[in-house]
Image (cartoon, coloured by chain):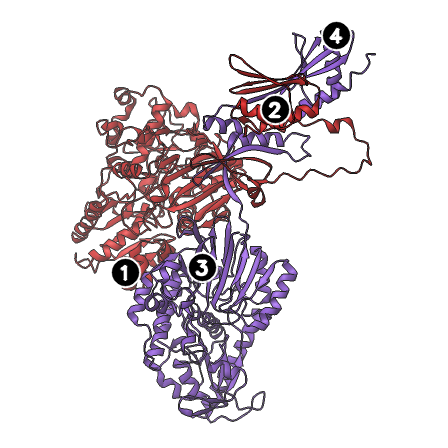
Amino acid sequence: MPEIRVTPLGAGQDVGRSCILVSIAGKNVMLDCGMHMGFSDDRRFPDFSYITRSGRLTDFLDCVIISHFHLDHCGALPYFSEMVGYDGPIYMTQPTQAICPILLEDYRKIAVDKKGEANFFTSQMIKDCMKKVVAVHLHQTVQVDDELEIKAYYAGHVLGAAMFQIKVGSESVVYTGDYNMTPDRHLGAAWIDKCRPNLLITESTYATTIRDSKRCRERDFLKKVHETVERGGKLWARWPGGAARGSSRAGLPPPLQVLIPVFALGRAQELCILLETFWERMDLKAPIYFSTGLTEKANHYYKLFIPWTNQKIRKTFVQRNMFEFKHIKAFDRAFADSPGPMVVFATPGMLHAGQSLQIFRKWAGNEKNMVIMPGYCVQGTVGHKILSGQRKLEMEGRQVLEVKMQVEYMSFSAHADAKGIMQLVGQAEPENVLLVHGEAKKMEFLKQKIEQEFRVSCYMPANGETVTLPTSPSIPVGISLGLLKREMAQGLLPDAKKPRLLHGTLIMKDSNFRLVSSEQALKELGLAEHQLRFTCRVHLHDTRKEQETAVRVYSHLKSVLKDHCVQHLPDGSVTVESILIQAAAHSEDPGTKVLLVSWTYQDEELGSYLTSLLKKGLPQAS
Amino acid sequence: MKLYCLSGHPTLPCNVLKFKSTTIMLDCGLDMNSTLNFLPLPLVQSPRLSNLPGWSLKDGNAFLDKELKECSGHVFVDSVPEFCLPETELIDLSTVDVILISNYHCMMALPYITEHTGFTGTVYATEPSVQIGRLLMEELVNFIERVPKAQSASLWKNKDIQRLLPSPLKDAVEVSTWRRCYTMQEVNSALSKIQLVGYSQKIELFGAVQVTPLSSGYALGSSNWIIQSHYEKVSYVSGSSLLTTHPQPMDQASLKNSDVLILTGLTQIPTANPDSMVGEFCSNLALTVRNGGNVLVPCYPSGVIYDLLECLYQYIDSAGLSSIPFYFISPVANSSLEFSQIFAEWLCHNKQTKVYLPEPPFPHAELIQTNKLKHYPSIHGDFSNDFRQPCVVFTGHPSLRFGDVVHFMELWGKSSLNTVIFTDVGSDVTVGTVLQRHRRDTWLYSKRPSSQLRRKQGLRDCPWHSLPDIHLEPDFSYLEALAPYQPLAMKCIYCPIDTRLNFIQVSKLLKEVQPLHVVCPEQYTQPPPAQSHRIDLMIDCQPPAMSYRRAEVLALPFKRRYEKIEIMPELADSLVPMEIKPGVSLATVSAVLHTKDNKHILQPPPRPAQPTGGKKRKRASDDIPDCKVLKPLLSGSIPVEQFVQTLEKHGFSDIKVEDTAKGHIVLLQEAETLIQIEEDSTHIICDNDEMLRVRLRDLVLKFLQKF
């Protein structure tokens, strides 16, 4: 029995180090190759020894597919391909191919240069790894080999994010990666056609959340940022040095500085567009900075990959490229110590290292400041800790950092919420659903919902656990057009209530399967037909002449067999379709006539019926 | 399978393919040669043009002098220019299901088709084709609409009057069907019917046919198309290039194993080498500018201009031209330059890698940044302030009949210091034109008027008409474009840059992809008439290519034999294969055929229904078997001895076997039954004893194979 097998090496009932193995019709595909931000030991990478302990990975995998450039989806790639060893093709979209090496290099720098890790992948390894990448275009059908094909669909989420359909013959799996079902300030919404895969593997980060409208969240965000810098700005103008007095909503002194930890690409651009347009509209003067040198470069990628952004930006980019920011400037480390109001975007987004963490440490002690976390934070990161209410953080060297600044969470990460996930399931109409990239408890809830609403099985394997789905693929064969047309023409006849049987011969030669009419099969194989014929003697009591008997037989059959072709031939015989009936005198009894009914095996049913009909005798002539 | 040929223009094709149950239009190019018969539309009032004398008949009758003007012995229609549409009567265009676009030059007739024929289908094109196609249409509409012309001439189109006109007006075909330019509203409506596709995307049409665009290497987003079912494959090759310029290279491998390959859009100047033309372009440009003259380059706003700017980028400094301003004037100049930078995925590998850095793929970004290249929507406005001479101006339209180029021709035409360089063969206005016009003539008139006769008709005085008529050498088309500007003092240089396939490349390609049949415009199946010895300038393949011309319907030479059908797994499990020969197995199939959306499925036959307990009286007719249910065919032969043994085993006694000429007769004396057995037949003759007959039948069947 053919089957599809799925084993998550990462992202099974967890968020982080996405890596899912799929076996479909004898092909093995690895979906994503991510790292885990919550760990800095072995657990940060998927356990590739699961694939093979001794052999080469290339022999066991037909291809690797990367859904988008986030490190929890591609962070382990150089380790996997260069240190463990894989030389097969790695597929990703072009924006992912452009941006992912930059993030990998960033990640490597933090791990090696800042944390001093040894035995990490090198810059050269990132380059070598990227040489194995094959770029795919949206909706292009990529033939990995003669049987395995993959196709990318737009996923929203981040620039270049894609969902992938993996197909062998009539069996298919769709893997969503991370996706977003509502368009945002810079990207469009994910879309897939009704491709009816055997299995849909979907992320479920926000499995239980139904988020309010994006507009509200944006308004909230702008309000918070605005209040902070505007008051701070005025106060700072009056009391140089930032000695803030006065009051704000909660009786707190008004904060001054806003830190927004982000990843260099993705949410950052969305929020920049948001602040940029707001600053312009309100004519605000407080400076906005973007922390790393990556800014300019990052925005440049967005400018060059305009076709991947949302409709509005694509339509207006000639007049105004939305990624050319007037109000947002590059950040200098020294600015962090200057007391004025400002908004700073700093990387990385989960406050687990780098510049955002540095600035956070500087600003955390001041209750006037604010940090806005615009996205999901993985367990173990500083971001996760402060979001869960922790206010005393143990830093390296047993230092304890007291967090006095205001901590705000705004869900800006572009994942589909429960509604969006259901929507995608509805779009693709899969036979089964498998959840990854989420927390077990929340998955449980969504699983029930999907099973109830769509009446399909839903799975949520843990890492290392295998789900096996039996499939029953149909077998494509070639039918000779003559046979098909003959059948279809007859299917169009009025009395087609009874299901009609098509009869033919399937010729199987190597892997070539053809269904042809029996005559053609015999001819092709050089075989002669063997004709089997029956002739039955039916005795009838009739004193009239043979010719008259034949006439009576004719009119009787004509009246009974209305749908059949009954003919009386000049030589005195009667035919029903191709069945021949002749009347003869009985050799001994002149009062009896013998009807010779003759038919071939092909007319077996009708022949048999006729003999039994005639046996009952003819109706009395009126 | 049929091909309806709606355009005879080899590089502006418009064909309709009927394949299985679908009707597919392949491209809809717009023939703009018709505009050459019209006077240019000047942006600024031109005393010269407005004072041209009206044309009168030889007998002095001047009733046409309002419509027709004479310039240097050539007669032009003084009216809003009009275009020659593809045939609209050959096939009911409302039945077209889809239109496949191969590149932005071949979609210019789209609004005429989608907006005025009852078309309700979908158009498929790549994103760059759509975006740049939109720019080309926008430019065209803008060029024509911004110079409103009160007059619309129609008198000259009267058949009786047209006969009296001098060539080429006299020979112009189907002038009654010529149409004015569409509006922007029609363009937008037409473009809204387009669905975007990517290379190698498989698009299902009604479950019957699959179409796939492939990179053709000619322009941004340009594609060839595969149209196939499971057993048949048609390749449509239109405007392909094997040269490495900016677009993604041509995908040749996917064209293999085609039953039919339709080949259009070859280079219009098979004897010119694009590389050396670019060199000539640069040196002529430099020479003119150094001598204090201006250079005018009539061009389309997209395509070759990107390559020219890239060459100039490398050339400017070394040639000491850094102080010379380069102007690009088009209502869509800015959009075109911007769009070219965002289609990285559609570019050649070198340009793709640039965006990884990230840098703009085309160096014209730097030319703009450094102020070496400036672009303007028109000569009005900012341009008039910035304008410095000597300079180089890129502007449209290449036909020289409308657009800002008209202004520069009038402005610079009188000085021999200036040069106009023609590079953009584009696809419409130039060599192919004349060629095509000639073709039309030859099939419209069985006998071509001799040159003597033509001379009699007064063509002599027009210099470019006294020369031989047919040219694959490039001299003529641009002269035709220049006609209304004669006499002209400025230098004219012809450096056509057409990167499309030449005949040598075609012959290599055909050898590589091996189609069973080639179909192409008739112009490609014989050498250029003026150079009948150049048999290298035609398609050479076996079997010879089938040719078409405008308004013809071709029956394509292949027969469909097979169709895909899916055998459902339950049915597949029930099949019993039997090996007939080594490696060949057979299985008889009796199944129910389901057909939906052009997909065929075979399902297991339903189980016989249980008798319903005799509640209802059966009608006699219920018992009548359906004669359409065929029993399988039989094959094999019956060995008499074994057969008799079997009969005995099953309780028959008193068996007698007689030999006959062809076989045997087995007699069951007791049952008065006779079985004739021959090599290929068996005949059972018995009394009407159904039980007996069925028993014998089944015993016979044991020895035979069913099919």
Q: CA distance from mark 1 to mark 3?
A: 24 Å
Question: Does mark 3 fall on the same chain as mark 1?
Answer: no
Amino acid type indicated by mark 4: Glu
Q: Secondary structure at mark 2?
A: helix
B498 or B692: nearer the eye?
Answer: B692
Residue position for label 3: A314
Toward which corner of the image does residue B428 lie, by quadrant? top left
Which chain is painted in red?
Answer: B
| Nearest to N terminus: mark 3 or mark 2 | 3
Q: CA distance from mark 1 to mark 4?
A: 105 Å
Q: The residue marked by circle 4 belongs to what chain?
A: A
Amino acid type indicated by mark 2: Tyr
Toward which corner of the image does residue A83 lie, by quadrant? bottom left
**Numbered mark located on residue A548 in the image:** 4
Visible residue check, residue B597: no
Q: Secondary structure at mark 1?
A: helix
B54 up-or-down from B200: above or below: above
B97 up-or-down from B621: above or below: below
Residue position for label 1: B367
Specify the quadrant that holds the C terminus of chain A: top right
Q: Position of residue A119 (x, y in %)?
A: 32, 76
Q: Secondary structure at mark 4?
A: helix
